[in-house]
Image: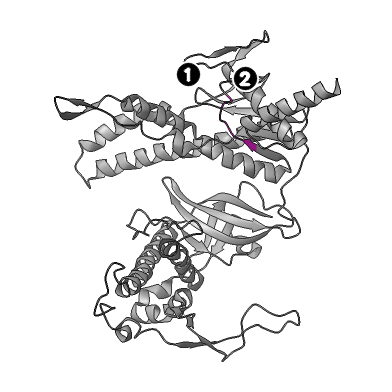
Amino acid sequence: MQLTYKYTLRPTKHQAVMITTHLELCRRQYNYRLGERFKRWESTRTPLNACPLTPYRVSVEEIYKNIPLTRVQTREGRKKYGSRNPLRKKDDVFSNIDGGYVQGLTVQLADLKNTKRLFPDYKLLDSQVGQDVVNPVETSFPNFTIPDKNGNRRGKPKFKGFHYYKSLTYPKLDNLNIIKDEPNRICIDLGKVGQVPMVFHRPIPTGFKVKAGTVIPEADGWDISLTIEYQRVPVTVAEIQPIAENSMGIDLGIANYVYFPNEKKAENPIFLRASAEKLARLQAKLASRVKGSKPSKILKSKISKLHQFVARASQDFPFKTAHKLFDKCDVSVVEDLSLKNWTRRGPVKTDIEDGNLVYLPNGQAAKSGLNKSILDAAQGQFTTVIKYVAGKLGKSVLFVDPTGTSQRGNCLYKGPKELSDRWYSCQCGESWDRHENSAKLIKKIGLNYESGGASTSLKKALAWREKEACVLTVLR
C-alpha cells in the first residue's frame, strides 16, 4: 500500500538558493535530453506520401556517432536472484540496440558522466536526482511517437521554461533521512543540500517506509511530498455488497456541491468565485506597475499566494466531504460525469441572409460562465478523491451512468423538466427537491446493479424492472 504525505520545508537562505540552483540544473538537463530525442526522431523521419531519393536528411553515422553500440556494467547490480546472486555482474557487456531501436533511457543515463565532465556545475547535483530527470523524458516521448491500442498519440512534449519545471525528486530516500538536528528540530537529509528543517505535523505510520521524496516550490516557500509504502498491506478494492442500509446515492451539482439524502446539503464553497474580485483588483494594480520593479514583484507574490489558497482550499474540501460521507455509509453510489462533454463549447449557429453566411447568437457567453462554475466546483477532483479515500478506509464506490437521472422520479416514472425547475413532483404523489430525487434514483440504480446483475445505467435498470414485472405476471 502506498500513500503520499506532504510536509512544509523551512530551509535556510543558503539551502533555498541551493535547491533553486538544483532545480534549474534539472530543468536544463530535461530540455537537453528531450532535444536529443527530437533530433534523432526528426532526422530519421521520411514522408509517407512520397519515395525520397535520400531517406535520411543526415547520414546514419552522423546521427548515432556519439551512441556506443554496447555498454559495460561497472558494478554489481542491485537486483538479485533468489540465491542472492546479482542479476547483473561487474564487467558484463550489454547491447544498447534492442530490436533495431536505440535504448534511449539507458544511453542517456550513461551519458550523464560526460555531462558532469563538460559542465562541472552538475557535480553540485545529487546523482540520483540527476538520473531521475531522464525518466519523465522516457515517459513522455514514447507517448508522443508510439500510438496506443486505439491508434491515438498524446501531444508533443514541450520544453520547460523557468517557471514550468516545478519539482525535483529524490528517488532513494529512507526513514533514516528524517532526523533531528542539534537545536532538536526535525529535519530531512537531502543529498548535496544537507539537513533541511521541516514542519513534521504528522508522523510516518508504524510499518510504513519512506521510498522517495519530491521537493516542490510553492508561493509561500517549499514543500516535500514523501511517498511511503507498507508492503504487507495489499492494494485491493473492497467488495461490499450494497444494501439500502449501508449505501448512499450522491448527486453532484454546482449550487450544492454534494447532496446527501435526508441530510444537510454540502453547499459549493465557490473558492474561485469568492476570490475573483480580490484577484481582479490585484491584477489591475499589477498592470499599472513597471515590469520587473519591486512593487510588481510584491504584487506577483500576493497573486501567487491567492491562487495557492484557492488551489489548496479546493483540494482540502473534497477530502473533508469524502470522509464525512463514509462516516455515514460503506458504499457510495456516484454519477459518472463526463466533464469534457459538460464543459464543451456551445454549437455554432449559422444562417444565410442575402446569400451571405451569418453567425447567430449561440449563448456562448452564458455557457462560458457556466463552465467556469462547473470547473470551480471541481467535481472531477471529488470523484478522484472519493476513490482514494474509499481505498484507504476499506469502503467501496460505484459509478453509474448519469443519463436520465434528472428526468425521472425515484419510482422510475419519466417527468421531463427544464434546468430552471428545481422541484420534482412525481405521479406517485411524492415530491422532492430536484437533487434529492436524483440522489435517490442514483442509489436505486446502484442497488439494482449489484443485486440484480444489470449494468449501472438507467436504461438497463428499466429493462430489468420490466423483466421483473413479466415474471410477477407469470407467477400470478
Expressed as whole percent of the image width and height from the top left, the position of residue 466 reads 71, 26
Where does label 2 land, which residue?
436
In this view, which residue lies farthest toward the bottom?
A: 91
In the displayed structure, does residue 34 sit left or right of residue 212?
left
Expressed as whole percent of the image width and height from the top left, the position of residue 213 reads 55, 59
Expressed as whole percent of the image width and height from the top left, the position of residue 77 reads 61, 81
The mark that comes first in sequence, 2 or 1, is 1
- Name the one closer to the observer, 298 or 43: 43
Rendered image quadrant of residue 436:
top right
Magenta segment's dominant SS is loop
Determine the secondary structure under disc 2: helix
- Name the one closer to the observer, 454 or 119: 454
Where does label 1 land, which residue?
419
Report whether residue 328 is seen: no
Determine the secondary structure under disc 1: loop
Q: Write the residue at 34% across / 74% down.
A: 40
Expressed as whole percent of the image width and height from the top left, the position of residue 416 reads 53, 17
Amino acid residing under circle 2: Glu
Write down the region rendered in magenta. 399-405
